[in-house]
Image: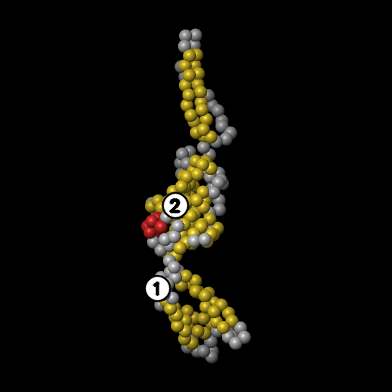
Amino acid sequence: LESSLVHRYTHTGVFTITVECSTSEWHVTAQGAISVQEPADDFGIVRCYSFNRSGDSSECTAIYGSELAIQVELEAGTNITYRVQHGETVLAMATATRGIIPCNITLSPEAQQQLGAGCHQVALLASNNVMANAVSKTMQLCLLEPVEGLWASVEPGRKPCLNPELQVSVSLDRGTPVQLQFQISGNKESFLEMKEMTSGSLQVFSIPARF
C-alpha cells in the first residue's frame, strides 16, 4: 500500500512529520523531521575591518599579518556556509543561520601567509544544502606591509625655464603599493601632487612647479 501527499511550506524551519496507519487489528505510527531551507540569494554590502579601519566596497585593504574580518550578508537564504577562496584554496569559512544577518569571516594571519603581501583576487562563496551552485562575488584583497625605508632626492628638470618641474627620485624598502604625496611650497602658495608607486625599486617622478 502506497500513498502520497503534497504540502507547500510557506516559511523555513525544521518540521516534524507524523504518519499514522490503522486497521481493525493494528495501529502504526512513524515520525520524521524535515528541514525546509531558503536558497541563498545575491550578496549585499561587503565590509572589511582591520586595524581600526573599515571600508564598504569590492576592494578590501588591510595590514598584512593583522587580523582581518570580512563582513558579509545576503539578500536571502538560510543555513548558509560562507567561504573565502583564492583559486581552489579555501582561506576561511563561516556559517550563519540566516543570510540577511551580517556574518563575519575572519582571515587569520596564517591564511594571509598563503597569499603573501600584495593585491589578490579572491572569491566570496555562499551555499547551503538546497543549492546546486554557490552564489559568488569577486573582490580584490590588498594586504599591505607597513611602509619602511622611504628615501627621496630632488633635482630640477632639464629645462627649468621652459618647462619648470622637479625630478624626484624615490625608493622604498617595503610597503608597496603606496600612494605618494608630494607637497611643494613657495613664498605665497603651495600645492599637492599624488603619485602611485607599485614597486619599491628606484623610480623618478616628474612634479610640475605650478608657481
Residue 159 picture location, percent across and down: 50, 89
Q: Amino acid at mark 1?
A: Asp
Q: Residues within 10 Å of mark 2 (few under 14, many from 20)?
A: many
Mark 1 element type: loop
Say which of marks 1 and 2 sits in front: 1
- Residue on which the image places disc 2: 84
Which residue reaches farthest front? 52
Residue 58 seen in this snapshot: no
Using the image, determine if residue 175 lies above or below residue 126. below
Precedes in sequence: disc 1 or disc 2: 2
Q: Residue at x 49, y 81 (%)?
A: 206
Using the image, determine if residue 14 lies above or below residue 72. above
Look at the image and tell me in which quarter the C terminus lies: bottom right
Q: Amino acid at mark 2?
A: Val
- Residue on which the image places disc 1: 173
Residue 107 picture location, percent across and down: 44, 54
Residue 20 seen in this snapshot: yes
Q: Residue at x 50, y 84 (%)?
A: 166
Q: Residues within 10 Å of mark 1 (few under 14, many from 20)?
A: some
Mark 2 element type: strand
